Image: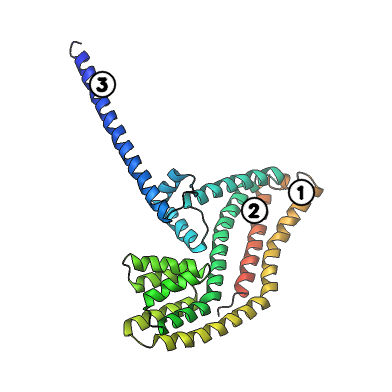
């Protein structure tokens, strides 16, 4: 008992010392961070107006495989959102559609609506990625033309890419700026261009990247290769536009098929209130609903596969 008092005092003093040291380390680190932010904001390298939400969730999510996949898809879409924000918003949307489906239709449709919400969130990212890729493909002839003119003027390929990033609009300018920044910090041209082709997959971009890499390695006639490539990309651009126009009706039908099924369920439930709840109250009714929804999904996938033409 006599030794307990000095032991308590010693532990208390030690905790106080550690607390003071921790507070000093935190204050000095915070001051260094503020100084760094002030220095970078004065040079325009960061934007103080963009305060991110859910930073703790974002840090934890980036360490997982799911977070890395989400981050890769978000980088390809060009959306100004972090993986943590996207994950939180998706969870809120899933909870919302679960509650809405369970209250409007029946409790059985809650989990099905949640699964549809997960699929819709992934489809949303894929749609934005495809849209950005299509926009980038549309700018490929202009990219090739700018690189050819810059190379013909005597500039190196690295300088030509940086100049094209400044002259072209988004998404080409933003993507080429990423490549130029990677080259500025020491990455090789092959790695930077290969990452660009992986981020925005398309045959046209692969051809352009292969042309630039081979010309950089072998030292061939970059100007003539880019000139010929510009003509080819212009022709492919027109062909893709014609094919997209011809398949617009088929793509609309693919989305109309599942919409008709969902609309029919809502119509039946509005005519006979509680009909879906009574139908899904038995095992046979649940199996019938799952089979019908699966057939609608199969029809959607089949129409999309049939209308998909690789150019």
Q: Nearer the viewer, residue 188 or 203?
A: 188
CA gap between label 3 and label 2 equals: 66 Å
Q: Nearer the viewer, residue 166 or 55?
A: 166
Secondary structure of residue under mark 3:
helix
Image quarter of the C terminus? bottom right
x%, y% of residue 50? 49, 50
**Residue furthest left as drawn:** 3
Closer to the observer: label 1 or label 2?
Answer: 1
CA gap between label 1 and label 2 equals: 18 Å
The answer to whether residue 103 of the structure is visible from this angle is yes
Closer to the observer: label 3 or label 2?
Answer: 3
Residue at numbered disc 1:
269
x%, y% of residue 206? 45, 77
Q: Earlier in the sequence, mark 3 or mark 2?
A: 3
Q: Is residue 94 left or right of residue 196?
A: right
Q: Earlier in the sequence, mark 3 or mark 1?
A: 3
Residue drawn at (43%, 80%) of the image: 150
| Neighbours of disc 3 within 10 Å: few (<14), some (14-19), many (20+) | few
Residue at numbered disc 3:
12
Mark 1 and mark 2 in contact? Answer it, CB < 8 Å. no
Residue at numbered disc 2:
287
């Amino acid at each position: 008992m006599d030794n307990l008092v000095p032991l308590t005092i010693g532990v208390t003093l030690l905790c106080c010392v550690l607390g003071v040291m921790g507070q000093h380390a935190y204050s000095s680190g915070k001051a260094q961070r503020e100084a760094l932010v002030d220095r970078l904001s004065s040079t325009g390298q960061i934007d103080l107006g963009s305060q991110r939400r859910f930073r703790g969730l974002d840090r934890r999510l980036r360490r997982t495989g799911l977070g890395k996949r989400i981050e890769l898809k978000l980088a390809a879409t060009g959306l100004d959102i972090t993986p943590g924000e996207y994950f939180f918003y998706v969870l809120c949307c899933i909870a919302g559609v679960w509650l809405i489906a369970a209250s409007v239709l029946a409790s059985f449709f809650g989990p099905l609506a949640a699964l549809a919400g997960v699929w819709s969130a992934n489809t949303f990212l894929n749609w934005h990625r495809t849209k950005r890729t299509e926009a980038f493909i549309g700018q490929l002839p202009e990219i090739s033309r700018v690189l050819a003119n810059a190379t013909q003027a005597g500039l190196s390929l690295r300088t030509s890419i940086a100049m094209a990033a400044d002259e072209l609009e988004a998404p080409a300018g933003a993507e080429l700026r990423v490549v130029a920044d990677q080259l500025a910090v020491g990455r090789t041209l092959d790695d930077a261009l290969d990452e660009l082709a992986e981020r925005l997959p398309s045959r046209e971009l692969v051809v352009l990247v292969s042309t630039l890499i081979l010309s950089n390695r072998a030292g061939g006639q970059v100007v003539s290769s880019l000139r010929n490539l510009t003509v080819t990309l212009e022709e492919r651009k027109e062909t893709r536009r014609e094919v997209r126009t011809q398949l617009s009706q088929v793509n609309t039908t693919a989305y109309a098929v599942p919409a008709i099924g969902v609309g029919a369920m809502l119509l039946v439930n509005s005519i006979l209130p509680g009909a879906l709840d009574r139908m899904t109250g038995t095992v046979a009714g649940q199996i019938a609903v799952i089979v019908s929804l699966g057939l609608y999904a199969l029809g959607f996938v089949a129409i999309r596969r049939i209308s998909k033409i690789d150019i």
